[in-house]
Amino acid sequence: METPGSQSSLHRANLERVVRAVRMAGSLTQAEIARSTGLSAATVSNIVRELREGGTVEVTPTSAGGRRARSVSLSGDAGIVIGVDFGHTHLRVAVGNLAHQVLAEESEPLDVDASSAHGFGRAEELVERLIEATGIGRQKVIGVGLGVPGPIDVVSGTLGSTSILPGWTGINPSKELAGRLGVPVYVDNDANLGALGELVWGSGRGVKDLAYIKVASGVGAGLVIEGQIYRGPGGTAGEIGHITLDESGPVCRCGNRGCLETFTAARYVLPLLRSSHGRDLTMERVVQLAREGDPGCRRVIADVGRHIGSGVANLCNLLNPSRVVLGGDLAEAGELVLAPIRESVSRYAIPSAARQLSVLPGALGGRAEVLGALALVLSEMGDSTLLESTLPVGSAVFT
Ligand SMILES: [Zn+2]
């Protein structure tokens, strides 16, 4: 056992700090590691040398601000992580390494409402096939991140809402998949994973406080505060779809009236256009028509943007994020939806909160959740396995 405060436990804590910084950032220069960990340049340099000798990190020459620098990332062959994303109509799986490289990725259509056993069976097959395609041994799998389109009950680990996924009632998704694959599985909802994906790989890079808004059959937000997903004690943080916009508005599936969702989600918005634009309309098609100049679709998208902006203004006043990233099909509408969002934000948010905020479309499209699932493993995996090769437990090393 190490004594807290001893040289060796301090050293171990420093090693972990450096590994954690690189694990979430993908790659950092030594100067960036020093800034983000608060360690001195000399300590970082010693620790990086040690980690490199142990095979935990790789160091490659790069340039930063015109000067030569050394870029540090976790070793590509130190392990692989897997992301599995169950959408409402698809299953997507990605395999990545610890250096943030995606090695294999595939998606297939899936009726997720049908039966959970069918869904997990397909996921298991696709995961095994993609691992094989990378040519990396299965023993290198560190963990699986799993995305489900509904809130997870933090205490029981089961899907909290039966109305969203009726075929999945009472299922514990992480236990189910872990039992099939024999590796640790970390689970989260699609909005939180979208937020993590954009934070690590997309439009959220470089910020620590972010809200990711996902508009699909419902409306949800993934909240990142100080670089961490904020879930709340029950795992329901970010349910902005049920902010009341109009007390005498349409009845929502939650039982209240005039929720944000009733003005923005596809199931409420599409009927507005069905008599003028045909019955088989999808949100994707509405966005496409709006981009081609269709006035009715443009009007509907602008109204949706205005209403989302009211919700974002509330978020802004409460949490003061520096960036809002819009995901889902709607993000494809670009300025047609972003401009009305910004307009509502500047109208309803307190000026000091609105001033610092940028509203951007997601950069990852439909891949945000599966990449977020990879990021979830990177964030939850812990550093012990990685450090075993570098620092045997109980060894006394001084920096
Ligand atoms: Zn509601």
Image (cartoon, rainbow, N blue to C red):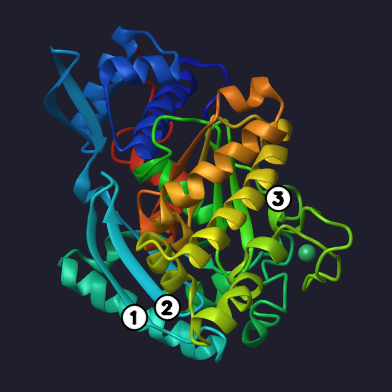
Q: Secondary structure at mark 3?
A: loop
Observer-nearest of 256 and 196: 256
Q: Secondary structure at mark 1?
A: strand
Q: Is residue 270 left or right of residue 42?
A: right
Above or below for 127 versus 318: below
Q: Which residue is labeled 2 in the image?
A: 90
Q: Is residue 190 left or right of residue 44?
A: right
Q: Residue at x 20, y 26 (%)?
A: 71
Residue type at mark 2: give it.
Answer: His
Q: Which residue is labeled 3 in the image?
A: 237
* Residue 379 locus on image (x, y percent): 46, 45
Q: Secondary structure at mark 2?
A: strand
Give the residue at the far right of this rendering.
248
Residue 378 seen anywhere in this rendered image of the structure: no
Earlier sequence position, callout 2 versus callout 1: 2
Q: Which residue is labeled 1 in the image?
A: 108
